[in-house]
Amino acid sequence: MKIHLNLATTDLAKSVQFYSTLLDAKPAKMLSDYALFITEQPALELALDLGSSVAPATDAHYGICVDSIGLSIERQETCCYANQTKIWATDPAGRRWEIYTVHEDTAERDAVGTTCCTVVADESRSCC
């Protein structure tokens, strides 16, 4: 089983570059108005469609859970009832992605002072 996402973009070249880096993969199919990534880790089919405008949701983000994240970028925070290390990236259309690993479950939702899933412009918004 694979997850399939179809995302609109106004700049296909920049989006392909971003997702090539994020997924460590090249598109399986590339046309002037469409790109398709097919990956096993994560099990994903990601289609990118060129459009004249994009309206990414302001109350959503996307994530990829990994087994570990390198120590040079580790940031352990309690967020969404788990102690996690996360790296955030934003695609050219403004969609936020998190790459994360869970260290342990916690009884606490968000630690005091955590930046859990917040956006700089809206510090009160949470992902959970």
Image (cartoon, helix red, strand yellow):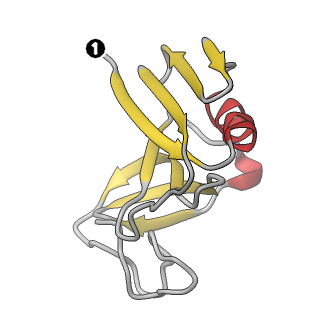
Q: Report the residue marked by disc 1.
A: 1
| Left or right relative to 13: residue 69 | left
| Left or right relative to 109: residue 99 | right
Residue, x 34% and y 75% (percent of image)? 110
Q: Quadrant of residue 23?
A: top right
Looking at the image, which is closer to me, 111 or 58?
A: 58
Looking at the image, which is closer to me, 107 or 7?
A: 7
Looking at the image, which is closer to me, 117 or 57?
A: 57
> Where does the image place residue 5, in percent across and percent down from the top left?
39, 34
Residue, x 46% and y 56% (percent of image)? 84
Q: Residue furthest left?
A: 107
Q: Residue furthest front?
A: 52
> Where does the image place residue 53, in percent across and percent down from the top left?
53, 57
CA neighbours of label 1 inside 10 A, class few (<14), some (14 to 19), many (20+): few
> Where does the image place residue 69, in percent across and percent down from the top left?
62, 42
Q: Quadrant of residue 1?
A: top left
Q: Compared with residue 116, is residue 55 higher up or lower down, i.e. above or below?
A: above
Amino acid under disc 1: Met
Q: How many marks?
A: 1
| Left or right relative to 16: residue 77 | left
Residue, x 45% and y 60% (percent of image)? 56
Q: Compared with residue 70, is residue 105 higher up or lower down, i.e. above or below?
A: below
Residue, x 62% and y 50% (percent of image)? 10
Q: Secondary structure at mark 1?
A: loop
> Where does the image place residue 71, in percent across and percent down from the top left?
71, 48
Q: Quadrant of the C terminus?
A: bottom left
